[in-house]
Image (spheres, rainbow, N blue to C red):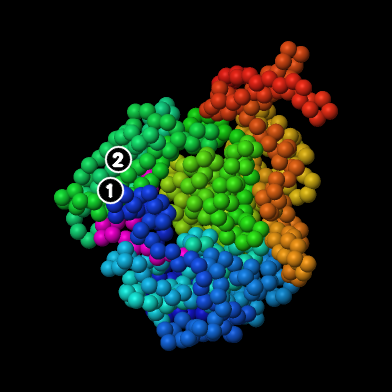
Amino acid sequence: MIKTASIEWLDNPEVFKVNRIDAHSDHLYYENKEDIKFGYDMPLRQSLNGKWKFSYAVNQNTRIKDFYKEEYDCSSFDYIEVPGHIQLQGYDKCQYINTMYPWDGHDELRPPHISKNYNPVGSYVKYFAIKEELKNKKTFISFQGVETAFYVWLNGEFVGYSEDSFTPSEFDITEYLKEEENKLAVEVYKRSSASWLEDQDFWRFSGIFRDVYLYSVPECHVDNMFAKAVLDDSYTKGILNLDLNIKFNKECFVNIYLEDKEENSICSLDKVKAEESLSKEIILDKVNPWSAELPYLYNLYIELVDSNNNLLEIVKQKVGFKRFELKNNIMHLNGKRIVFKGVNRHEFNCQKGRVITKEDMLWDIKFMKQNNINAVRTSHYPNNSMWYDLCDEYGIYLIDEANLESHGSWQKMGDCEPSWNVPGSIPEWKEAVLDRAESMFERDKNHPSILIWSCGNESYAGTNILEMTKYFHNKDDSRLVHYEGVFWNRDFDEICDMESRMYAKPADIEEYLNNNPKKPYISCEYMHAMGNSCGGLNLYTELEDKYDMYQGGFIWDYIDQAIEITDGNGVKKLVYGGDFDDRATDYCFCTDGIIYADRTISPKVQEVKHLFSNVKLTPDNKGFNIRNTNLFTGTSEYEFVFYIKHEGNRIFEKTILESVEAGDE
């Protein structure tokens, strides 16, 4: 344990975590079965969201250095809302930029250095007392998302340091806690060496923008778990490979049981002696497979009990059985060729930035299901953990992307010039990017909606990204690995399991597919949806039937990133890059979505919905032909409605029911 913080960590790429505990799965756990109903609000968790004391400084030299000490009086500090961005709460300046780094034109910097003149610091303080359920237990603090680097103290004692804005950072605070009032201090820096790895096309915010909470664990606890649920070669039998990491202070046993969605018992294993690492394989004769069309989930329960069968802990984890694989160089899900009809999705709310709510997420999923969108690439960072639960439940395929983009280090003024590209093959960046891969994998590995791991975006190439691919392959043989950047350097072609390009013309895609391709093709970004666009989408969707190895793509992008403000006349309006006098900026290039920033649906969606439809209707002289391109579902649950309008009024209407099986017409 390191007991003293150092400001030197900020521009050292080899220091990206200090005293941070190992990444682990995002499963929920309870001390009794009745508490399962609380879901995320589990009794062993205490939220620290809300108002925090706050002090702002433009750089490290002007910050209040001793604010974390117990005796320091913070009563003069302002208040700030957590979760929330500093820049959307009256401090600093909002800045939008695409490929350049935000300091370009201000500071002449090379990796891994950062500016000492402008590097905003947020000093956060929260006073709290722990609730009864957490007392006398091992207790941790979890920061689900902090941008970009931060230090933590509790009651004047240094707790830890962490980078990576989009995955959890957690610390053991047991030895520092008091039963009465505690003083938690967090010092957040807008920029660090990690900023060289986070050059995504978005607003450059900072602060604590996801949930913060305390959590305690029972004396016998499932610390980490991987429930890998796959199908056998017949795609009918289920195979559940369960790997558990258990921490226990006394003898305990494991009960494992599985229920279907109707809560019927499927199988059980009782009184298995607990070990620190425990693996079990369960084979089921027949299961309902998971897909976006039929997102069938089973309930897996893991109980830790003592020798008298008294419950110590229970875990409830939803699992979906699926098989995603390459067959004859074509991606298949549950034995069927899959086509991605996807979008790239930034997390965004026009009022709160990347602080999004469950309501935002549910709106997005409902919209996608209504408009035939079946897949999302989490561009370009791991999303809020709840998003994956919702995609599991409602059925959305995911490319889960690591928090890595270094666009401005190798593509300058549109040219490829990688002389100082990071992470590249530079040894001091290797562990930082592997940590980002590990943090994403460990948190998200139990979600059936994830079909593909992605190493990141637009970071050129190099051995460090190749090591990320090797990590994913070594950890998980049930998913494929994606990375777009190999197009720029074919020496690293093995980084990606598919041919993935951005904004390729249909003719260029056909050229690839007609020349003995070794990998299936996807467009990880295409149909740049800025302005009145998406008119040529049919030129891409027509390739789906023409080439088996063409497997769709992901529109750039889903939602405009415009910020809502109230002007001097009291009128609310949406503003863009440059409207905050931010330089460098890419101005209105932040508005590339098929929906507007306030989630108003744009006219472009009509084209997307029509061309992404899995049910194709073709009229002829005798009526119309129904072609069902779904993989697993027939049309028996659909109503076919046709009508005739005259001067805007329906003068004839008829509804018919017609059953066309998946893949038939």
- At a point 19% along the width and 48% down the height, the residue shown is 309
**Membership of 225 in magenta stretch:** yes
Can residue 195 be seen here? The reply is no
Please give the residue where the numbered disc 1 appears in the rendered image. Answer: 303
Location of residue 661 by image quarter: top right
Q: Is residue 163 left or right of residue 369?
A: left
Q: Secondary structure at mark 1?
A: strand
Residue 108 at x, y percent in the picture: 69, 75
Magenta part, dominant SS: strand
Magenta-highlighted residues: 212-229
- At a point 73% along the width and 23% down the height, the residue shown is 643
Q: 17 and 216: which one is in front? A: 216
Q: Is residue 587 left or right of residue 126?
A: right
Location of residue 85 by image quarter: bottom right
Location of residue 121 by image quarter: bottom right
Residue 186 at x, y percent in the picture: 49, 74
Q: CA distance from mark 2 to mark 1?
A: 9 Å
Please give the residue where the numbered disc 2 appears in the rendered image. Answer: 257
**Membership of 503 in magenta stretch:** no
